[in-house]
Image (cartoon, rainbow, N blue to C red):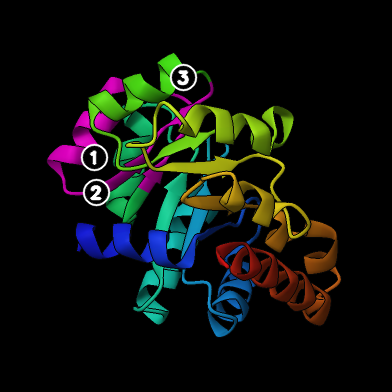
Amino acid sequence: MKKEIIERVKKEKIVAIIRGINPVDCLKLAQILYKNGISVMEIPFDVSKTNNDNTIISIMEIKKTMPDVIVGAGTVINIDFFNKAKEAGAQFIVSPNIDNFVITEAKNNGIVVMPGAMTPTEIEYAHRLGADFVKVFPASVLGAGYIKAVRSPLNNIDIIAVGGVNENNAGDFIKAGAIGVGVGCVANKALIKEHKWQEIEDIIIKLKKSVNEARM
């Protein structure tokens, strides 16, 4: 299963980040994403909250109702969040940081892990610890040129660009050498609150086009 998840990420190149959305709307958005060819989805925890039931419920509901979707947990900054993600059935783990314990536990449990890093030293260190992908964050601040520069000496590491990546610039990061992108633009809270699903779908379609054109 781990190999399948890794290959799916590399093939689709998009990890949809669904942050701060209630489980009902999260499931609706997941269905729209899947209809448009995006089947890898990250549901992040909120470290400012003591109750992350919505994240756990969303992961469980997507897994139960959409078995072909690969769903993971985001903002897994420590072992406590890792255990919650594992219990919910998360198939991959994403972090903004490098936590050796989280990476080790993910490896021991056969769960794909994507820790966050910024500098070449951090990127290489995360890879050496056993990261399946390294999330370079915040990508929009660093720019696509940074990804290209880092990939030159570290071309053995699969990088996912995350942070400020959207339907307008996603292709730039793929062209620069990122194996994939993590995007939160698909979960526009204002549009979801108004249930403007067609406008959200338009964003998803534009995002897919940007990434697909970058492959050529």
What residue sits 42% from the left and 25% below the top?
Answer: 123
Q: Quadrant of residue 7?
A: bottom left
Q: Nearer the viewer, residue 127 or 25?
A: 127
Amino acid beneath label 2: Ile
Q: Which residue is mark 3?
A: 120
Direction left: furthest residue:
108
Kindly identify the residue that appears in the image at 53 percent across and 72 percent down: 38
Q: Residue at x 57, y 85 (%)?
A: 35
Q: Which residue is mark 1?
A: 106
Q: Residue 28: x percent and y percent?
A: 62, 77
Q: Is residue 161 visible?
A: yes
Image quadrant holding the C terminus, namely: bottom right
Q: Quadrant of residue 198?
A: bottom right
Q: Circle 3 sits in a helix, a strand or a loop, which is it? A: helix
**Residue 110 belongs to magenta span:** yes
Instruction: Evaluate if marks 2 and 1 touch, with contact meaning CB atoms under 8 Å apart.
Output: yes
Q: Earlier in the sequence, mark 1 or mark 3?
A: 1
Q: From mark 3 to mark 2, how far is it between C-alphas?
A: 24 Å
Q: Is residue 111 above or below residue 136?
A: below
Res. 111 mark: 2
Q: CA distance from mark 2 to mark 1?
A: 5 Å
| Distance of label 1 from label 3 (alpha carbons) | 23 Å
Secondary structure at numbered mark 1:
helix
